Each structure stands twice: as structure tokens, then as C-alpha cells.
Image (cartoon, helix red, strand yellow):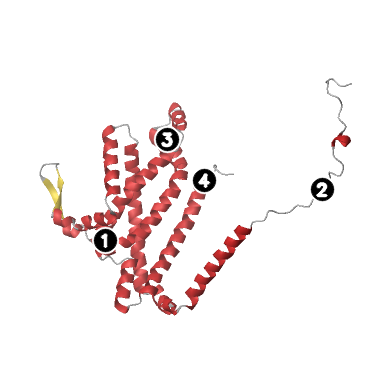
């Protein structure tokens, strides 16, 4: 006996006759415009590749001759050195500036904000030329009592050369951007974890080293990798200081032999090759710091 007032339902009678879903023919959704876009893109890529192979103006024999030339390999090494030193010094200083901005001290916050504002506002080429001409402003640097007598000094002309000025300019410029990247990563960590760590009596330094930074790295790494790649390509701007990095040496060579296009392709190929290597390294570093966050 039914406990409800609804009458019993006859399932056989409720289903319309001939309603057999298993017999229906499934037709996939058609995307004609998608296939048209694929075909048009494929044709454009094929035309570009055909032009690269058949157009003699690319002068691939000249490209092959200079791609692994000693002068080019030395220039690549200088470019890598500029990138490495600029990245290491820039991010070390950037971490300090980031925690200064996160400090409870208004003075430290103001100093860090002023640095970031200034170095993000001034073009990199202006900064590089300023450091390159530092000896014009200061003949020597003295170390001693502030506003008092100096104990020893350095000749600025011999201390800050072209390479040193380039590293200094790139690093100080990079530090302003690195500071904001690190600060954003730290702010992305839930503040409740720090409160819990403080309640457990964990020291501040250990909180930062073992709790904040491992989690912040997930947010920091993608943006930091973009900055490193931008710095690697941006080292070409130091050619104004006659430093023998990749782009400068390419300019010197095609200024002598007039083979502009193949020499530019040499620089392009090296930039693409090394940027791809940095991207692969970024992938593995990100995968290491994403342990426990992905399943």
C-alpha cells in the first residue's frame, strides 16, 4: 500500500512508443570556420618556410660560417655573464627592497618605494650611460667616517670600467622590478599561516625561510623568469658602451662585410636558443616548487 497520495506510475506507459535512444545516430559538431582558420594558418607558415629556404637573400652559407665563429662565441659568453651577474645582484637587492617595503618602519618603506619609483622611471640606457660616466662626477670614492675624514680611497676611473658599469646598471635596474615581484609573491601567502607560526613560537627568520618563501616561489618564479629572459635580451642595449656582447659583435661584423641579414639571423638564433634553454630550466624549477600543490 502506498504511503503517498500520488497514484502509481506505469513506466512502460509513461515512455512514448519508439523512444529508443540507443538507436539514435550521434553526429559530431562541425566547425567549418575553425578548419578554415587552420588551413589559412598552415598556408602562411608553409609560405614563410618556403621563403626561408629558397630566398637567396637570407644567405644561409654566411649564417653557417659565423654562427659558431670564435668572435660570436666569445660575445655569447659576455652576454651570459652580463645576464648572470645582473640577475644575481638584482634579485639579491630586490629581496632586500621587497622586505623593506613590507617592513613596519615608515622610513624603510619610503626608501624602498623611492628607489623602485626612480629606477623604474629612468630608461635603462640613461642609467647605463650615467654609470659609465661616473668618473666625470666623482674622481675618487673615499671610505671613512661619514661627513668626516676618509681612511682610504679608490680611483673611480680604474674602479668602474665599461663592464662594471654595465653590470651595475643592469643589476640596479633589475632590482627595482625584482622587488615588486618578490613583494607580490610574499603577499600571496595566506597571512594566517604566519599567525599560526608565531603562535607556535617559530622565529621570524625561520618563518620567512621555511614557510613564506617556499610558497611565495610559486608566484614569484613565472614573473622572475620573464624578467630574466627580458634582461638576457636587454643586454643588447649595452652595445652603446662598446662592450663586446652578442649584438655589438654582430654589428661590428656586418659593418665590415655588409652581410646585415645573415648576421642578424646569427644573433636571432642565439637569442632563441638560449631563451629556450632558460624556459626549460624554468619549467623544472617551477615543477620542483609546485610539489604538494598539484596532484
Task: Name the residue tied to disc 2.
Answer: 22
Left or right, 178 with respect to 166, comes to right
Mark 4 Cα shell of 10 Å, populated few (<14), some (14-19), many (≥20): some
Residue mark closest to the camera, 1 vs 2: 2
- Mark closest to the chain's N terminus, 2 or 4: 2
- What distance separates the C-alpha of mark 3 from that of mark 4? 19 Å
For residue 68, say whether it is visible: no
Mark 2–mark 3 CB contact (< 8 Å): no
Residue mark closest to the camera, 2 vs 4: 2
Q: Quadrant of the N terminus?
A: top right
Mark 3–mark 4 CB contact (< 8 Å): no
- Mark 1 lies on a secondary structure that is helix
Q: Could you say which disc has been placed on residue 290 in the image?
A: 4
Q: Quadrant of the C terminus?
A: top right
- Mark closest to the chain's N terminus, 2 or 3: 2
Q: Residue at x 32, y 77 (%)?
A: 258
Quadrant for residue 12, please give it: top right
- What distance separates the C-alpha of mark 1 from that of mark 2? 75 Å
Task: Name the residue tied to disc 3.
Answer: 207
- What distance separates the C-alpha of mark 1 from that of mark 3? 38 Å
Task: Name the residue tied to disc 1.
Answer: 163
Percent across and percent down for residue 259 are 35, 77
Amino acid at each position: 500500500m502506498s504511503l503517498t497520495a500520488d497514484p502509481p506510475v506505469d513506466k512502460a506507459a509513461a515512455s512514448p512508443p519508439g523512444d529508443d535512444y540507443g538507436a539514435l545516430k550521434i553526429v559530431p559538431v562541425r566547425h567549418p570556420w575553425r578548419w578554415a582558420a587552420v588551413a589559412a594558418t598552415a598556408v602562411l607558415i608553409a609560405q614563410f618556410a618556403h621563403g626561408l629556404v629558397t630566398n637567396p637573400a637570407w644567405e644561409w652559407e654566411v649564417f653557417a660560417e659565423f654562427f659558431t665563429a670564435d668572435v660570436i662565441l666569445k660575445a655569447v659568453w659576455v652576454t651570459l655573464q652580463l645576464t648572470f651577474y645582473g640577475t644575481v645582484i638584482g634579485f639579491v637587492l630586490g629581496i632586500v627592497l621587497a622586505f623593506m617595503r613590507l617592513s613596519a618602519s615608515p622610513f624603510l618603506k619610503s626608501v624602498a618605494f623611492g628607489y623602485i619609483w626612480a629606477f623604474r622611471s629612468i630608461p635603462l640606457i640613461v642609467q647605463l650611460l650615467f654609470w659609465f660616466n661616473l668618473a666625470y662626477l666623482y674622481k675618487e670614492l673615499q671610505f671613512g667616517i661619514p661627513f668626516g675624514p676618509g681612511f682610504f680611497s679608490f680611483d673611480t676611473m680604474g674602479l668602474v670600467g665599461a663592464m662594471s658599469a654595465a653590470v651595475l646598471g643592469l643589476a640596479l635596474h633589475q632590482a627595482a622590478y625584482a622587488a615588486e615581484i618578490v613583494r607580490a609573491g610574499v603577499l600571496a601567502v595566506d597571512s594566517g599561516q604566519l599567525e599560526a607560526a608565531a603562535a607556535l613560537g617559530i622565529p621570524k627568520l625561520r618563518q620567512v625561510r621555511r614557510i613564506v618563501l617556499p610558497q611565495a616561489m610559486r608566484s614569484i618564479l613565472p614573473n622572475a623568469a620573464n624578467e630574466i629572459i627580458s634582461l638576457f635580451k636587454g643586454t643588447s642595449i649595452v652595445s652603446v658602451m662598446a662592450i663586446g656582447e652578442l649584438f655589438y659583435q654582430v654589428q661590428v661584423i656586418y659593418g665590415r662585410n655588409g652581410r646585415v641579414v645573415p648576421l642578424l639571423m646569427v644573433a636571432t638564433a642565439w637569442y632563441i636558443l638560449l631563451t629556450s634553454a632558460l624556459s626549460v630550466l624554468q619549467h623544472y624549477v617551477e615543477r620542483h616548487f609546485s610539489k604538494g600543490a598539484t596532484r
